[in-house]
Amino acid sequence: MMSMTKPAGFALLAFVLLFLLVATGVRAADAERGKMIYQECKRCHQAGRGAKHRIGPHLNELFGRRAGSLPDFRYSSAMRKAGAGGLVWTEATLDAFLANPRKTVPRSRMSYDGMTATTDRADLLAWLRSLSGGRLPAAEPTMTAAEYGLDPGLLTITGDLEYGAYLAGECVTCHHAGGAEQGIPSIAGWPIEDFVITLHAYKNGKRPHQAMQTIAKRLSDEEIASLAAYFARPLNEP
């Protein structure tokens, strides 16, 4: 019987491996596609060179970082406890968190239902991994007024802090004034610009949430600016 030559053997092995990859549906993660999926995340998170904390912390150097450990971001007590308990962001823990944030970190402030598609999570994590080392791209901004189709002049309105404190009475029937979550996302300490953009996005129906849309539609531009000023204050202030 004629023996198979080495080149022929290697070619056969490569063909078998390729066949197995196709047959089992295995695919390489697509970081470029992951950057597009990140558009879901940028409502709250910045990422890239010069990224800053917004509603959520920036996403640079995420892999290998202990949960709730950035010293200049005000995490929820749930996230800090998870980090103190040993939660470190790895491929596996980030995948689980993206799939179901509230299951991975109960009472997390992250108001996101979860990313169900395995391939979407894999691609997003491939892009986030590229931000954990090496030269970072220019920072990706959080959602802007223009992206929601809002008048940028809404961001120039100066809110009345005392009026905001009065109006906040309705907000704190659900959102805890001191920043605790208790199953409801905290809005304490939000940057003013993010708060104004978010409330107007609810008001115009550009951001989905029936209860929040109903509440926001009752608020004037000045009332939204005043609420933003109130909730942006440091938590130790009245």
Image: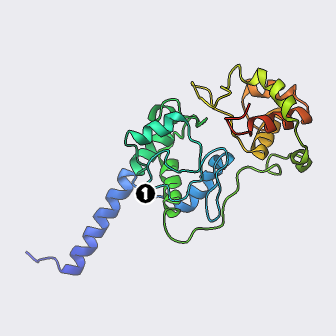
Residue 94 appears left or right of 135: left
Q: Residue at the spot x=78%, y=43% of the render? A: 192
Amino acid type of disc 1? Arg
Residue where numbered disc 1 is placed: 27
Residue 65 screen position, x and y as percent: 45, 53
Residue 29 appears left or right of 48: left
Residue 60 screen position, x and y as percent: 55, 58
Mark 1 residue element: loop
Seen as rendered, the residue at the extreme left is 1
Given residues 24 and 33, the one toward you in this image is: 33
Given residues 208 and 223, the one toward you in this image is: 223
Residue 102 screen position, x and y as percent: 51, 32
Up/down of 83 relative to 102, above or below: below
Q: Residue at the spot x=41%, y=45% of the render? A: 93
Given residues 218 and 225, the one toward you in this image is: 225
Up/down of 223 relative to 75, above or below: above
Q: Residue at the spot x=52%, y=29% of the render? A: 107
- The image quadrant that residue 6 belongs to is bottom left
Q: Residue at the spot x=83%, y=24% of the render? A: 166
- The image quadrant that residue 160 belongs to is top right
Residue 149 screen position, x and y as percent: 85, 47
Residue 170 appears left or right of 126: right
| Quadrant location, the C terminus | top right
Crowd rating for badge 1 (residues with CA inside 10 Å; few <14, some 14–19, many 20+): few
Residue 109 appears left or right of 205: left
